[in-house]
Image (cartoon, rainbow, N blue to C red):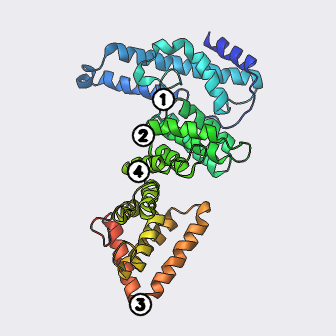
Amino acid sequence: MLGRVAAWVFVVSGFWQMSAYSAFAEAPLQACYDHWHALEVSSSESRTADEDSRQRAKLASSYARSASRAIRVAFRQQTGQPPETDSALFVRLSKIVWSSIEDRIPAECRIMPGVGRFTDSAGARQVRSQIEDARQRNEPRLAASLATFLADGGDARSQSTLGEIYRDGGPGLEKDLERAVSWFMKAADQGDPLGLFQLGFLYVNGTGVSKDPSKGVNLIEKAAEEGFPEAQYVLSQAYQQGLGVAQDQERSIRWLVRAAEAGSPVAQASLAERYAVGKGVPRDLPTAAMWIQIAEREVRVSFTSGQWELRSQIRGMAQQIAALTTPEEFARAGARASECERQDYVNCPGS
């Protein structure tokens, strides 16, 4: 029955585009089944597990595997090709096929939009990896298609990622600020730091929304409090300049240090500059030399193709600070930088 339904759906859908298939159909429910099966064989835990939930999980995973197989068979029957399709089509098929088993799926195992979520699964992680790969290859259309599956399922980080994709656009995908704002809002409503940060940035600049620096900085501060380094750095700049908040050099330095300690090379370089010129802190060239060398190492480790300018700027700043110190002083600062990194920035100079 499921095979006939899936085949019929494929015939009438008219969607034929083929690309990277991800096995996110059955993996999440299979993981849920494995979890409940583990409870069954554990005498201590099985007593606390709900028998009905275990049985429903087993049945749901069985249905999910059947539905997944039916969809793959339908593709092969109709196209003669392996079951490799874009996520948007796969989601459409899965929604229709799985709608008949919605009441059989326990809340712990639901993953489809309108059915539920299970976005911590191996399948979901695989999709996230493919999203990042597509973005690195500058294929925003594919990235958006993949991200939509998880975003529709309620995954906050994927909602933020989808917002970035629509905000930036690219080959085959036009910029769509309205969609970007909508996705950022959904992610922010769930407290996702990236969503809070990106939405805040839009409000600060008035991009796609009415300009409201105060509201924007408030959202960015929420992201900073969640430990998001980019938000911590931007918040530091806001307090330094009095943008959307009252100017406060002490808070500016505090947030800058937190961003630097979290591994942001931009924040580390900015902190080095502050110590080199005595901006908001006492002038301290050894500490400036320490932080700029930490920034050099960090940008080297985390370097991507889009960071050439940042890497060049940090290197230039390191040369300037080195020129203000003796070679011996700069070398000692390098040793302090190594020690600081080894102790995870606990009790480091300037932190």
Instruction: Name the one closer to the observer, 179 or 117.
Output: 179
Q: Are marks 4 and 2 in contact (CB under 8 Å)?
A: no
Q: Position of residue 72 (x, y in %)?
A: 65, 24
| Residue at image coords 55%, 73% | 313
> Image check: 344 left or right of 124?
left
**Real-space Cα distance between discs 1 and 2?**
24 Å
Query: Which residue is denoted by mark 4 in the rendering?
Result: 221
Q: Nearer the viewer, mark 4 or mark 2?
A: 4
Q: Position of residue 198 (x, y in %)?
A: 52, 47
Q: Nearer the viewer, mark 3 or mark 4?
A: 4
Q: Position of residue 321 (x, y in %)?
A: 46, 82
Q: Is residue 126 visible?
A: no
Query: Which residue is denoted by mark 2 in the rendering?
Result: 191
Instruction: Name the one closer to the observer, 201 or 5.
Output: 201
Q: Amino acid at mark 3?
A: Thr
Q: Which circle's residue, 4 or 1, is located before the other in the chain?
A: 1
Residue 141 in the image: above or below residue 278: above
Secondary structure, mark 2, is: loop
Give the quarter of the figure containing the C terminus.
bottom left
Query: Which residue is denoted by mark 1 in the rendering?
Result: 28
Q: Which circle's residue, 1 or 2, is located before the other in the chain?
A: 1
Q: Nearer the viewer, mark 4 or mark 1?
A: 4
Q: Nearer the viewer, mark 2 or mark 3?
A: 2
**Real-space Cα distance between discs 3 and 4?**
39 Å
Query: Which residue is denoted by mark 3 in the rendering?
Result: 326
| Residue at image coords 75%, 18% | 11
Q: Amino acid at mark 1?
A: Pro
**Real-space Cα distance between discs 4 and 1?**
34 Å
Outermost top residue: 1
Q: Amino acid at mark 2?
A: Gly
Q: Amino acid at mark 4?
A: Glu
Give the quarter of the figure containing the N terminus.
top right
